[in-house]
Image (spheres, helix red, strand yellow):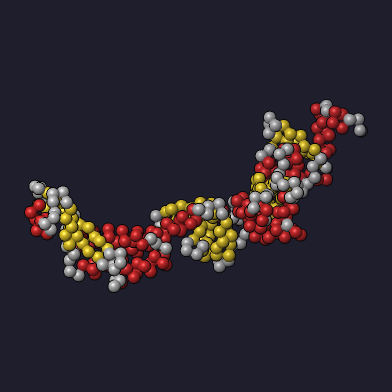
Amino acid sequence: MKTELLIALEQLVKEKGLAMDMLFDVIEDAVIKAYKNNFGATHNVEVELNRETGEINVYSVRIVADEVFDEITQISVDEAKKLDKDFESGDIVKEKVTPRDFGRIAAQSAKQVVVQKIREAERCVIYDEFASRESEIVNGVIHRIAKGTIYINLGRTEAMLAPNEQIPSEEYVQGERIKTYITEVKNATKGPQIYVSRTHPGLVKRLFELEVPEIFDGEVEVKNISREPGSRTKIAVYSSNPDLDPVGACVGQKGHRVQNIVDELQGEKIDIIEWHENPAILISNALSPSKVMRVEVDEEDNSALVVVPDYQLSLAIGKEGQNARLAAKLTGWKIDIKSETQYKNYLREIGEYEEVYGDDE
């Protein structure tokens, strides 16, 4: 008949997903310590926890020796043969020494250790689960806000959204559902610590993977992302399939796909551009939504001179230089933008006007 201990262990295995063998091992170790603490045992002991019934027995373990030097670890051949006539020198004698009412002491010790092991195991399970999900999106509920840090309930644990990972323009409300990007998972003494972000470019990439099947399936590749959180993002996409428009796939019918991402980012503007191996074409695309007339690339200096129509200059540069700044970050090139008039004046200064425009004045 199963003991209460065994029934309780079987229930833990089902509820917590713990391994039964692991529980047996830690309980046996705990019971040995309990036996030595309560009965002052100095000899070698083993504990056996019956896997079928849950019954616990304690055994003294000694080696049969022709000459005994240590009575704690050794037993003479004559003494051993009194227990079993087949014992010979070198054999191991296990003698049952389970005290009366030891089951109660064993159960108390087992309970303490199992509770501790459950906590440790749950922490390990949670850590392993979220460590494998680094660089992914997690969905949770804002649980509390303390000293600027937002704690997000993920079910069995919490994630921390630090002030520098929050978008200043966003309002965070307790009880509100929120999507964040896992940046790091640490296995701390108090349990796993999960750090998340709303500002990381990876959040935008993962949102596109959720919304655009072609990205998730690998038909469209996200080449790079430059982002100023809460304000604007530029994302460069590419497809090796000539029949597939990567930008159109990301925008979606009537802009539905990209609009869902904009809504999730609470109005952050998103420019989707097509990546190209030719740096001049890539830079021209990156300065969207402005129109580009000319791009002169200096590969040695990793820089580019871009010419735009006069009326497009402010659009190309963007408010406080944002459009040019994001384009430079997206492409990896230093970009100098000039209006057509500025460019013509520049050519005159260096004496190359006619070489580029001819005698058109």
Q: Would residue 6 be found to the left or right of residue 45 on screen? A: right
Q: Residue at x 48, y 57 (%)?
A: 129
Q: Is residue 145 visible?
A: no
Residue 145 percent across, percent down from the top left: 52, 62
Give coordinates of residue 179: x percent, y percent. Answer: 59, 60
At x 21% / y 67%, what residue is drawn? 102
Q: Residue at x 35, y 67 (%)?
A: 9
Vertical placement of 125 versus 290: above or below? below
The answer to whether one can see residue 85 in this image is: yes
Instruction: Please tell me which residue lies in front, 56 or 360.
Output: 56
Residue 41: image location, x then y, percent:
16, 58
Name the spot of residue 177 as percent of width and height, x first.
Answer: 58, 65
Drawn side of residue 248 relative to residue 359, left or right: left
72, 174: nearer the viewer: 72
Split into 4 quadrants, where in the image is the N terminus?
A: bottom left
Instruction: Decide if residue 17 is on the left or right side of residue 237.
Output: left
Residue in front for this viewpoint, 188 or 126:
126
Image-quadrant location for residue 117: bottom left
Q: Split into 4 quadrants, where in the image is the C terminus?
A: top right
